[in-house]
Amino acid sequence: MPPAFQHPRSANSEGQSPIHCEACQSAFRSGSRQAVSFLLLDHLTVPALGCDDHLEQFASVCGLTSEDTADLLQHRPAGGIRCPGCRLAPHSTAHPMLSVREGAVTPMACPDHQAEIVQRFQTGLRTRQQLSADIGTSGYSNY
Ligand SMILES: [Zn+2]
Ligand SMILES: [Zn+2]
């Protein structure tokens, strides 16, 4: 049993306040297993923890870095997780918590794929900022 996220402040939240979304909080409290979804992005299959809403937002931001859209599965994908490191990752302890608006998502991948997902998320955020700047709106309501 991994200890459930006792140090959210040490995670990669860039000084933003911790999670305000109760659904996310309870997903983190319940500690992996049932709460885990699977993010499918290109060749990656990455277990991720968070509430449905914020996982969706996380996926759509990551999807901005891809030709394909990112998918979310609530169950282990049929083909399983190809990367052995990612398969074991939910059982290890240290994963970054990424702020997604008022919530948070924790991708639980091996170090390599975790770095890739974090990078894509940050790239996606920049892309989205540019997009919304182009459109001239600041609302994120319609993804
Ligand atoms: Zn949430
Ligand atoms: Zn991996």
Image (cartoon, rainbow, N blue to C red):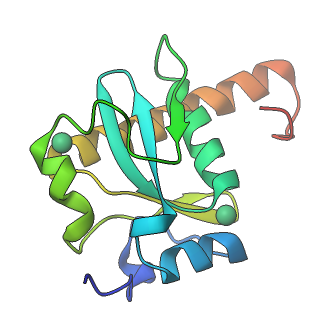
Q: Front-most of 49 and 117?
A: 49
Q: Front-most of 114 and 33?
A: 33
Give the vertical position of 1 relative to 87 (above or below): below
- The percent position of residue 36, horizontal first and vertical second, equals 45, 59
Could you say which quadrant of the image residue 112 lies in?
top left
Give the vertical position of 9 relative to 100 (above or below): below
Q: Residue at image x 29%, y 23%?
A: 43
Toward the front, the furthest residue is 78
Residue 18 visible in the displayed image: no
Q: Position of 139 compared to 28: left or right?
A: right
Quarter of the rendered structure image containing ligand 2:
top left
- The percent position of residue 91, horizontal first and vertical second, equals 21, 69
Q: Front-most of 77 and 93?
A: 77
Give the vertical position of 49 relative to 9 (above or below): above
Residue 96 visible in the displayed image: yes
Toward the left, the furthest residue is 84
Toward the top, the furthest residue is 67
Could you say which quadrant of the image residue 113 lies in?
top left
Q: Quadrant of the C terminus?
A: top right
Q: Residue at image x 58%, y 70%?
A: 16
- The percent position of residue 72, horizontal first and vertical second, equals 53, 38
Q: Residue at image x 20%, y 50%?
A: 87
Total number of numbered discs in the rendering: 0
Q: Residue at image x 53%, y 26%?
A: 63
Q: Quadrant of the N terminus?
A: bottom left
- The percent position of residue 140, horizontal first and vertical second, equals 81, 40
Q: Position of 102 compared to 97: left or right?
A: right
